[in-house]
Image (cartoon, rainbow, N blue to C red):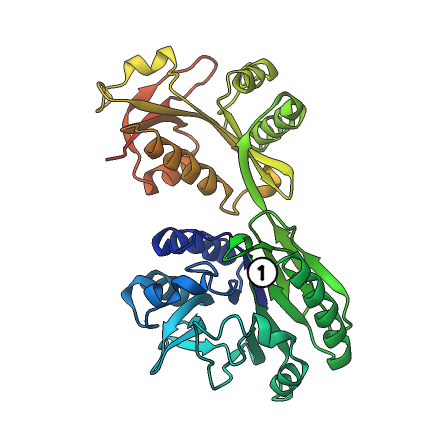
Amino acid sequence: MKICLAQTQSKAGNIQDNIANHLKFVERAIVYKADLIIFPELSITNYEPKLAKTLATKVDDNIFEPFQKLSSEHGVVVCVGMPTNATNGINISLLIFQPNKERDVYSKQLLHQDEEPYFLAGYKQTMLTIKANQIALGICYETLQEDHFVNTIQKGVDIYIASVAKSKKGIEEASEFFSKMAKAQGLPIMMVNCIGACDDFVSAGQSTVWNAKGELVSQLDATNQGIIIYDFETEWSEKEQLTIEKGNASDLDSLFKIYKAAKEALEDNNIYQWTDNYPTRQIIGNDIESDVLYVLKSNNEIIGAINISEDQEAEYKAVDWQFNETKVLVIHRLVIHPKSQKRGYAKLLMDFAEKYAKQNNFTSIRLDAYSQNKRVVEFYKRRDYFIRGEIYFPEREYPFYGMEKALF
């Protein structure tokens, strides 16, 4: 059984943007074949008690349908944080989406005194059973109350997961407590925290997994979004904290090695998309100097890159583009290191590029894809890029397809 902790940064009260961000993390969990993904306390609204009355809703609200759809299609259980309407007030809840089942909810049973003016306590413990493993859920303050914790896990629990929103001091206290409890009770404990501004404090991340000996297995940092994947049976874990940022001169060596490795991997599959003269170290360096190269980092290691600019190759003039008179963004030299391919990273870079295009009022995107690289051509087609014509570049036997996508 694989469990995914999603350390996120939410925008106060912006439910739609937060759901969109959550869905990206669910998709990352699916890539890793996770059985369960869980988010921090009140993650859909951010931890904002003063806004809860305005934002609270029911678990069957249609806005959550994308979570149910992904859950049912991919067999993953999804738990997101949300204030929910109760009979006489509002609960701090985890909404639980299970494959092809009715939505469930777990509501925090013990409230901190600062929460009492805004919320009511829940009254029952919800357990999850996944692949014959019993999982107990807890939400922030209650998870550090020893009596509550012990009473919960004595119901035959195999693993305990705390969904929290905690400051640096709160994380220090929680880390000490959970390590002690994991060792004393002989079961793994996982804690997922958010990052960024929350109510009147800054949440300090550091989502963590402790094994049944109380030993720290994996931990994220205090400032970046990311995930931890933990395999309960094997105790294997992997963390992924992704950032996309502009490349700089110090990245050139790493980037050139990535492009070279990608070229060699293509040629191993008889795809001669790139040559010894393209892309060169100088071309990559020019991309960096021109401020148009963005790098994808996983845990601070560069694993991919993309060129985003308005520059079109002279050969593009041969294509009958549909949007000739509009503001056009062009994508070149998208690359993912071969060791990191088939894990959804190209999709992340394209998501980033398309979001950049929309934010900067571009009306279409153009790119070229080598006609013999069938997998890449299909990748772009699935993203609604249409072939407008053929482009011939030097030293290639076969053409590239000029592909275009409308953004309006």
Q: What is the quadrant of the C terminus in the image?
A: top left
Identity, as a three-letter code, of the amino acid under mark 1: Asn
Could you classify mark 1 by the number of other residues whose Cα lies within 10 Å: few (under 14), some (14-19), or many (20 or more)? many
Where residue 54 appears, as percent x and y from the top left, is 33, 64
Count of marks, rendered view:
1
65 relative to 372, above or below:
below
**In the image: residue 160, left or right of residue 327:** right
Q: Which residue has dot 1 on it?
A: 193
Given residues 199 and 241, the one toward you in this image is 199
Q: Residue at x 54, y 74 (%)?
A: 113
Horizontal side of 338 relative to 390 (left or right) equals: right
Residue ID at (60%, 89%)? 155
Q: Is residue 405 above or below residue 284?
A: below
> Which residue is more in the foreground, 184 or 222?
222
Q: Is residue 144 above or below residue 290?
A: below
Instruction: Identify which residue is drawn at 61% across, 30% down.
Output: 258
Residue 232 in view:
no
- Which residue sits at x=39%, y=62%? 51
Q: Secondary structure at mark 1?
A: loop
x, y percent for residue 366? 33, 26
Is there any visible trace of residue 331 in the rendered image? yes
Q: Position of residue 309 (x, y in %)?
A: 41, 22
Residue 405 occupies quadrant: top left
- Front-most of residues 253 and 111: 111
Image quarter where the N terminus lies is: bottom right
Residue 21, position in %: x, y? Answer: 43, 51
Task: Say if 134 sits above or below 217 in the image.
Answer: below
Q: Looking at the picture, tell me which residue is in the foreground, 270 or 169.
A: 169
